[in-house]
Image: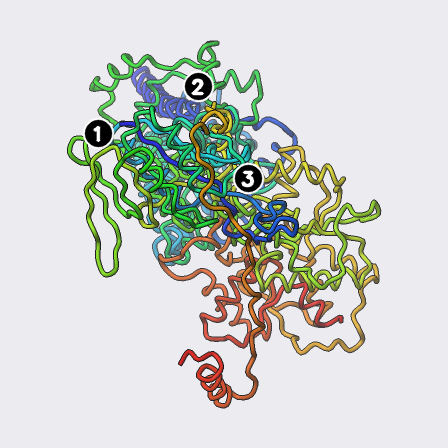
Amino acid sequence: MKICVIVKRVPDTEANIKIRTDKPDRIDESEISFIINPYDEFAVEEALKIADEKDGETTVITVGSKESEAVLRHALAMGIENAVHVTDNEESDPFRTAFLLGKVINDKGFDLILCGKAAIDDDTAGVGSMLAENLGLAQVLVVTKVEIAGDGKKVVCHRDIEGGTMVVEAPLPAVISCQKGLNEPRLPTIIDIKRANKKALETFDSKSYLEGFSGPRVKIGKFTSPPPRPVGKVLKGDSGTAAKELAKLLREEAKVI
Amino acid sequence: MWAMNGAVGFTVFFILWGISLWLFASALYGRISLLARGRPDSRLDQPLERATGVIRNVVMHSALLREPYPGILHIFIFYGFMVLGIGNIFLFSEYLAPSLMWGVMDSSLYGLVSFGKDIFCILVYCGLAMAAYRRYVIRPDRLERSSSDATVIILLITCIVTCALFIDVFRFAAAPFTLSYQNWAVIGSFLSHYFVGFSGSVLHVLYWVAWWGHLLLILSFLVYIPRSKHMHLIACAFNEYFRNIGPKGRMTKIDIENSESFGVEKIEDYTWKQLLDLFACVECGRCMENCPAARSGKALNPKFLIADLKNYLLSRGPELKATKSSLIFQYILEKGLSVPIPRSERELLVKEGFIKLAEPEEKTADVAQPMVAAGPPASEVKVLVGEAISEDVIWACTSCGYCIEHCPFYIEHTNKIFEMRRYLTLMLKSYSPQVKSFLKNVQRNSNPWGIGWQQRGDWAKGRSIRTFGESEDIEWLLYVGCAGSFDARNMKVANALCELLDKAGVSYGILGKDEKCCGETARRMGEEGLFQAAVETNIELFKELKVKKIITLCPHCFNTLKNEYSDFGGQYEVVHHSELLPKLLEEGRLQIPANPNNALTRVAFHDSCYLGRYNKIYESPRELIKAATGNPALEMPRNLDRSFCCGAGGGRMWMEETEGEKINVLRAKECLDTGANCIVSACPYCLTMLDDGVKAANRDNMPTKDIAELLRDSLL
């Protein structure tokens, strides 16, 4: 069984994001570290688990800048066997990413394609479904359980829905996007990472795959920061008066009770 | 008249000795060859220092005498046996060559020997009585789950000493005062009066019963030694000679680039010294006396750990012996390796013929033979990590070092645990979610809280503070550490320290957002790779900035930078703030006002393990308390080298504590019991733990402070 995982490089969840003053459609990358998109980690873990059970072969693919190599290395450190890097500096358009992925994946004969339900940076959640459309494959999105059934011919997925679970069956090959709760991704040790750094990657320039690309469908206008959090209030006096004051403020000012 | 020494007697005598020596030697050889299965470790440096230690502890019993009662009783038995041994040389020589020895036995030399023998017989009895009283009446709980060896030995020694005495008694009774040494053998002589009326032939028989009984008992003892915990008679002197003379609890460096496997998976993955430790253990239980894990009801008990490892090693014996690798010893002697052999090098050694591994066929053939029936069948053989020693045991250690500090034979318990943690973390990735999240946070943001690394210098916002390296004249690097940088409570401590340093005019700078975690906790959690990555980054940065002198806020950073970075080429002058501040007071750079505005006059001081036991810093924090409050620190019953850990070391700070009682609450209660109106420590982990502990004991209003805050409060 051949399994493919799509990953993306995103800013660390703890990073303090600043918008570039010269280009408001870009963020200032000078002081932030980047990680593998946390939802993609679920996809990597699931690929490893399935490969372990079904004796499968795993490949990780990313589309992105030179620096995106680090997230491929991370996936390799977790245990993925092969890595493909499509170098491309236009990361803002999911349509373009899905187009490039479709071209690269097209003739590789994967049985299962896994990705995160969305990237935590732009949160467009578009690449997975667009890729499935490009490849003409079934897609099951935001899943919390994956089971390969029917002798590897189909997949049964669970999706959390309001008040219950939806069980979806799809023929393989299929594209599946992974939600938190699917599994508990393993943490590679530094030794795993060092070893992964020595592995060979397959690298392609996006230019050689852009033939027939009709141009971006969307373009980021600009980013704005959320308004700064207002300063908190400290109520003084004994607890009786403070409690009364608090109740009043919650009702009249915050309007939450 | 002493007719038992004819040809028959001699034959029996020599046959008995032959059998006993053979049984002794074969068991001893068996154990030594098990040691040879261990990995190499060079412990041959500083022979003089090592030898002095042996004299100090074997001849003078100094480590044992740290506890007078068991120490003294051991002295009685130990020296009694020495003197009895000398007496026996005469006794057996006389048996073999009576005519030759006659003159000697009649001399004052033997008189002196028998005087000593008699006196020491009494002292041995005293020692045995004390031992039995302690073991069966007082029953200290640290003697729990001892093997039956102790009882056997107490009985054996009693019988040996009794026979030794009665050989003389019957001899004197049969022929009073024909031997001049009877005047010296005060006890034997005295007791012989009770037997004077017995007929010569009865005394003759009784004499030989005592004589042969004595011999048989001694030989049984000889055979018993290597098969019981009394192996310590032989092993402990060697264990003391080969003891760790480097910094306490320092973990071994692993070659992470060139090794295939890490940590200890199988018992033979330990070094020969770690295995020798197992045979040296006499199950005295000093290690568990104040072990935070054992005392709070956790799975770990250091005494049981050593006993379990020893039993495991012995149970694996037959299989281990099937792999003939005794040539490792030769390799150690030739190469003097200080680190375990990485797997790749091991393969090379096999190729070169230094190590011979058994052929797989040979192994299976061996297992199939009935000879190895002593070991359990392969299917029942327990795995070491996780089965013979449970993961709960392995994760319970706080690395407080109480066990290694108080073991009279210098057994290194903590490294045995951390080697198994290395295996769990690096090879199996088997750890709790909290450990995982710790490791992830340190990997990504170089601090356990997982807060963005860019905010590391934010604790000093609003303070005019220099960045190390911004000008050439900055003398000290203030290495704040993760707690001082990210934990709200300890950020206050960092600021208090800065106020003091500023006031004293100390030239220092911080690294701000460029500071990285020192790696200590990751190392104690078994993530050697993460530790070494931190070491590499820090050493490189320190080199670039020409850092030579470092002040640390946290004893864990302090110990690591001072004692563990040197293995990687990092040599710095490192001081902890509790050492630096008294110096600043002494030099007059900080002055306590005449009427310090300080209501906190009764201060209980909690010794941090990494300052105290690990680095012997006991006095300077106490001097500071005296200076800051005018009163000496209030001492807890468990203080100084007997201090009870707060429960946070060894990475425990970041793990859940679900089993037994909470260690920090136990310690906080002990602090409260001193009647103090403030609890002071000198470690961010201790501060957090005691603060939580005091709250759990419903004493929220009890202030807990770092020593720097205490001094700042009375000074500024």
The reply, left or right, for residue A18 in relation to residue B466 is: left
Q: Which residue bears the numbered disc 3?
A: B531
Residue type at mark 2? Ala
Residue type at mark 3? Phe
Q: Where is residue A86? Give x, y as percent.
A: 47, 30
In this view of the protein, which residue sits in the foreground, B473 or B17?
Answer: B473
Chain letter for the residue marked with disc 3 in the picture: B
Between the C-alphas of marks 2 and 3, the distance is: 68 Å
Q: Quadrant of residue A231?
A: bottom right
Q: Which residue bears the numbered disc 1?
A: B379
Q: Where is residue B508? Give x, y as percent.
A: 77, 52
* Residue at screen point 36% across, 28% down: A105
Q: Earlier in the sequence, mark 2 or mark 1?
A: 2
Between the C-alphas of marks 1 and 3, the distance is: 37 Å
Q: Where is residue B471? Give x, y as percent.
A: 82, 47
Q: Which residue bears the numbered disc 2?
A: B97
Q: Nearer the viewer, mark 1 or mark 3?
A: 3
Asked if residue A35 shows in the view, the reply is yes
Q: Secondary structure at mark 2?
A: loop
Asked if residue B64 shows in the view, the reply is no
